[in-house]
Amino acid sequence: MSLLSNPYDPGDFFDEMYAAGGAVRPHYRSLVERLSSLSLPEFERRRAAVDLAFLRRGVTFTVYNDLEGTERIFPFDLIPRIIPAREWSRLEAGLIQRITALNLFLHDLYHEQKILKDKVVPAAQILSAKHFRREFMNFSVPHDIYVHICGTDLIRDRDGTYLVLEDNLRCPSGVSYMIENRSAMRRAFPNLFQSYGVRPVEGYSEMLLKSLLHIAPARDERPSVVLLTPGVYNSAYFEHCFLARQMGIPIVEGRDLLVQDTRVFMRTTAGLLPVDVIYRRIDDDFLDPSVFRSDSMLGVPGLIAAYRAGTVALANSVGTGVADDKVIYAYVPKVIKYYLDQEPIIPNVPTYLASEPEDRKFILENTAKLVVKSANEAGGYGMLIGPASTKEEVAQFRAKVAANPRNFIAQDPIMLSRSPTWCDNGLEGRHIDLRPYVLCGEKTVVTPGGLTRVALRKGSLVVNSSQGGGSKDTWVLDED
Amino acid sequence: MAQPRKAMPASKIPAPRPQANVMLSRVAHSLYWMSRYIERAENIARLLEVNLQFIIDFRGYDDAHLREHWGSILASSGDVELFEEHYDSADSRSVTEFFAFDLRNSNSILSCVFSARENARMIRDQISVEMWETINELYLFLKSRSTADVWAAGPYEFFQDIKRNSHLFQGLTDSTYSRSEGWEFIQFGKFVERAHKTTRILDVKYHILLPSAGDVGGALDTAQWQAVLRSASALEAYRRFYVREILPWKVAEFLIFSDSFPRSVHFCVAQIDEFLRRILGESSARPRSEAARLSRRLLADLQSLSIDEVLKEGLHEFLVEIGTSLEKISDEVVQTTMFYQAESTQEEQQLQQQQ
């Protein structure tokens, strides 16, 4: 008996591997051949070896609100998600188009605000956005790049059409798992890679460092780049270490830095050393207690003054959160059209805005049928999946929406595509999404692949690691 | 002074500044504590193992003697009060629980390994993958065991595993970590802890009362001194040095004054002095910093005193004094090289939403 002796029924979903009628899609055929020759015990053996390796290497994340055993490994599924070359090049073009427009949008919002004056995006929506930083009006960032690192969440609907689910423009995480997953797969199936023509993802860290060096203030000395972490208790601490190590830059906490005469320094055993670029994995609000939240112990007093003086660069820039507000998300197709005069290559999920009277009426009447989301939450928190919720939960959410309409949007539930995933009794279809990573430096580049997250619970549409999600390696092929 | 905004001209991306010689104060601190905690865990494992064995060998011990024996170990580690707060009586099982697994005891093996790992986690980007994996595996190993398991399987294997992992870690550090400032902090921490623990191990015997004065020099007394040597991995080395029988003052002399045995106080303090001078950049004959002055003084004592002088003043007092000096020296080094603010809270670090 092998892994594939009992193919599951793709059902009413778009399945990544099985076409309608159960035929294996061409780009999965070699994989199927390979897996068919693998006995179940052998597959189990490799699976256990991969899990053990993750644990030993400490490739873990931390779960909030969980006092006992806060570190967990991110469950990893050994069946890769495969994307053929032509499909990828379209995605790549779409992602570059989108981030280009968003960077132009941010620049405009913090300068002339032409898009508001032309009433393409209502000014009220921007002014009420939680992450709009009016104190940075008319402040220019190096090369006008606001978002240097972006993780865009993509999903596929019932027809297999890719849609943008959300933009993550502040501190997107997960890229370390993209790279660790690949190295786990290489160890588990070394021979498979040789014949398959999978494009490498390992160039990410080098490209990231280049993007960071690109914004260094001009000086005589070589710039010094650091990664600013909230600390060891942050859920993504593993990733911060991973990236710092890959780039060969120091990882610092706020208390390692100080500002003198609007220059940032790090405290070393040899005294103070200047810092030129900060890849910060801390939210805007916590960066500088003298400007933002005064109770923050994470930040560096005076950092914003140094940033304003142009002596230090931050990635991402302050204030990018306005563009990944889920209300503003609904306007991104218009934003693309406005700045680039192009149709979006990857469409949005149709979205209802609770702040608009007609939409609000629709949302309140149909809450149980919709997915309702808070405008500024992440990690799968602050959302309601109507069809999967109890009457009480729906009623609670409806009351929240009515009380604060600006803070909510709703979408029709998308039947996310499914991918074959190893479950206790063999392969079954599980829902997945895809987060590719885009870097904006001298050039804008998309790493071929990304993090495919999978909802491991049967029928679940929530892929977040904090809520029972796992991940898969994502293969972008050289050819179709 | 503010500078006008000028970004690098496009397409001329500069090379980053090399970071090999940059050592954040916080990182130095973590290296130091990581190293100390691993050494501490190993010493506790050895102490427990030897004494558990000792008690098995001496079946003649009655309950009162057992309690007394464990009491002396608790006394030498300064943990009597904490122990009594949580346990009814001191027997092999409760003391093993307390020293091996009890997280309420910040000096239990599990606490030490946990702290070593937390420090290593904070500086994971700075140490080698091999070092990290060893600490992590030791931690995972400990977490998967309990006193009951250890008892069921026989404690010997368990303590062996801990010691072996500590040795593996020190060996890997030696062969995978660059000889940099970080190395100096690692070594400094290790020798401070080792010197300290050797004084404590020797002091255990001070707290063990012999059943009667007539037992001095008897079989029990000798066995106890032998256990002291084994607790410091020093039995073979001692035998090579003093071929004759095990004599109390010779044991004390060996563990304090030997200039070649790597766990003797003298040997450790010589290393401490060396690494501390490198860390603080002390190159002249006369020390400049308080830390260097203190370590030089301690070293001079260890180089020049005789065991008779020490015994005349009181061995226990002498050992306590060395412990105090060691803590002063390490505090001074910490204060001179490590200046930063209090840590932010766990909640605040977690508050950072991960997108």
Image (cartoon, rainbow, N blue to C red):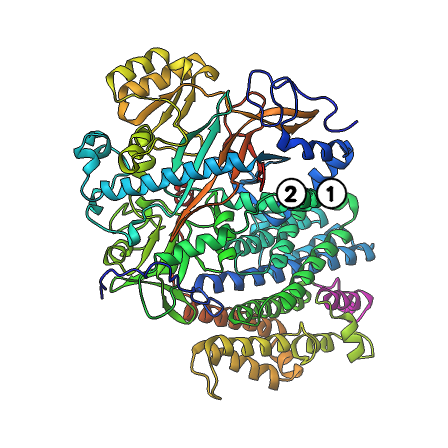
Same subunit: marks 2 and 1: no
Q: In which quarter of the image is the C terminus of chain B?
A: top left
**Residue placed under numbered mark 2 in the picture:** A185
Q: Which mark is residue B149?
A: 1
Q: Is A253 left or right of B208, judged from the image as shown?
A: left
Q: Distance between the residues labelled 2 and 1?
A: 35 Å
Residue pictured at 67% horizontal, 65% vertical: B171
**Where does the magenta region start and end?**
B209-231
Q: How many labels does the image show?
A: 2
Instruction: Determine whether the residue tagged by mark 1 lies in a helix, strand or loop.
Output: helix
Question: Depth check: B281 or A410 in front?
Answer: A410
Is B220 inside the magenta-drawn segment? Answer: yes
The amino acid on which the numbered mark 1 sits, given as a three-letter code, is Asp
Residue A252 counted in the magenta span: no
From the image, which quarter does the N terminus of chain B lie in? bottom left
User: What residue lies at 71% left-to-right and 64% top-to-bottom?
Assistant: B231
| Of B88 and B189, the residue lying toward us | B189
Residue at figure coordinates x 73%, y 33% from the top left: A33
Q: Looking at the picture, which amino acid does disc 2 mark?
A: Met
Q: Which residue is nearer to you in this view: A27 or B105?
A: A27
**Magenta span: chief secondary structure:** helix
Image coordinates of residue B162 in percent, x first then y, are 69, 55
Q: Which image quarter: residue B42?
A: bottom right
